[in-house]
Image (cartoon, grey):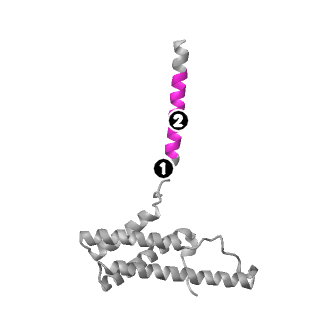
Amino acid sequence: MFDSAMNRYLRHTLLLAALLCAFCLTAQPKKGQRPKSSKTEMAQKQATRIADELEFANETRDRFIATFVNCQQEMWNLRPGHADRKREQAMTDAQTDSLIRARFDHSQRTLDTRRKYYNEYRKFLTPRQINRVYELERKIMRQINNNCGAAKKPASSTHKAPKS
């Protein structure tokens, strides 16, 4: 009787250990792959990189990072969903007009948000520093987009054929 209970306990323990190992292995990123960062983490890294480049003092640095992340989060919340997009050929004039007006509204909300955060930055940064922040932000985004685009392209298409 004792052997039967012990065997059952041992089997359950081994089964639980196997399930736990399988779960841990599936949660691990694949070899050569980094775990994905959340948008907020990426914004914090970007803000930290900009703050390092501009050599902000600690208080300014902390305030900049918090403001930058808040701005990014507001901008993300403004992005329109992809569900509304239809093929323009299949849309009526009224639907097309509605889509164009929605794009104008989105552009205006984006501009309002950018203006709001420009005024926030002006409370602790000079206009030159703010301009440099915008330049560095664009530079970082170009690098990210170039890296993402390069990863998606097949290796054979990255090499150009010599001109004859």
Residue in front for this viewpoint, 4 or 92: 92
Please identify the quarter of the rendering in which residue 8 is found: top right
Residue positioned 54% across, 26% down in the render: 11
Residue positioned 31% across, 70% down in the render: 63
Residue 40 belongs to the span the image colors magenta:
no
Q: Is residue 68 above or below residue 103?
A: above
Residue positioned 56% across, 69% down in the render: 152
**What segment carries the magenta color?**
8-25
Q: Position of residue 56 (x, y in %)?
A: 26, 74
Which secondary structure is most common in the magenta stretch? helix
Label of residue 141 in the image: none
Residue in front for this viewpoint, 133 or 104: 104
**Residue carrying label 2:** 18
Q: Is residue 132 above or below residue 32?
A: below
Q: SS at mark 1?
A: loop
Residue in front for this viewpoint, 148 or 56: 56
Reading the chain from its start, which is encountered first: label 2 or label 1?
2
Q: Residue furthest top?
A: 1
Residue 20 belongs to the span the image colors magenta:
yes
Q: Quadrant for the C terminus, please.
A: bottom right
Q: Residue furthest bottom?
A: 164
Q: SS at mark 2?
A: helix
The amino acid pointed to by label 1 is: Gln
Q: Residues within 10 Å of mark 1 (few under 14, many from 20)?
A: few
Q: Position of residue 48 (x, y in %)?
A: 34, 69
Q: Position of residue 153 (x, y in %)?
A: 56, 71
Label of residue 28 in the image: 1
The amino acid pointed to by label 2 is: Ala
Q: Position of residue 140 (x, y in %)?
A: 41, 75
Please identify the quarter of the rendering in which residue 55 is found: bottom left
Q: Residues within 10 Å of mark 2 (few under 14, many from 20)?
A: few
Q: Quadrant for the N terminus, please.
A: top right
